[in-house]
Amino acid sequence: MENLILGDPLDKNTDIGAINSKPQLEKIQMYLDIGVDEGSKIYQSTCAIPKKGFWCAPTLFTDMSQSHRLVPEEIFGPVLVIQTFRTIDEVIAKANNTPYGLSGGVWQIKDQKFSKKSKDIRAGVIWAKHSISLIQLLPLEVIKKVGWAVKGLEGLLPYVSSINNPR
């Protein structure tokens, strides 16, 4: 986390861009306060943060149970809640304990059993040990509260029309 670069999202060297507004930054800070108040361990990066704009240091929370408020939330900031699990069934139960379901990821897999059971997670896309940024191009199954961007480029077609503009 210490080596992450916060800055201009159009710069190829940037890892994390700014928060889009002051109200969103305040909402993220509210979640950080809740995590600390609930007794979770917090780890915040000491990487350089630009002075101009709305910025939040990359943050990890550990030692959170399913009852912690941050666990099922979509924070929309550089905040990650890390939970451990002992069995595949336990991780599936934890992953399904949220009103959201656009995508999910599992970063520690010791064997291939998870691949066979990943269909039990109620989400449009499940990443195992990686994620990719092409998700917006893919049509996804609508699952739970997922917002507007679930149909990929196909979702825009009803709202556009061809224009012939000869010059």
Image (cartoon, rainbow, N blue to C red):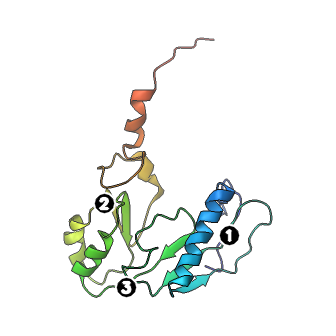
Q: Which residue is mark 3?
A: 84
Could you tell me how far apart the alpha carbons at marks 3 and 1 are, in whole angstroms? 27 Å
The answer to whether residue 54 shows anywhere in this view is yes
Regarding mark 1 in the picture, which secondary structure is present there? loop
Mark 3 or mark 1, which has the lower sequence index? Answer: 1
Mark 1 or mark 2, which has the lower sequence index? Answer: 1
- The residue depicted at 46 percent of the width and 63 percent of the height is 74
Q: Which residue is mark 1?
A: 5
Where does residue 149 sit, x and y in percent of width and height? 42, 46
Q: Residues within 10 Å of mark 1 (few under 14, many from 20)?
A: some
Q: Residue furthest top?
A: 166
Q: Residue furthest right?
A: 51
Inspect the image, locate mark 3, and give the three-letter code of the amino acid beneath it. Answer: Thr
Q: Which residue is mark 2?
A: 123
Where does residue 16 sit, x and y in percent of width and height? 63, 64
Inspect the image, locate mark 1, and give the three-letter code of the amino acid beneath it. Answer: Ile
Regarding mark 3 in the picture, which secondary structure is present there? loop
Could you tell me how far apart the alpha carbons at marks 2 and 3 are, in whole angstroms? 19 Å
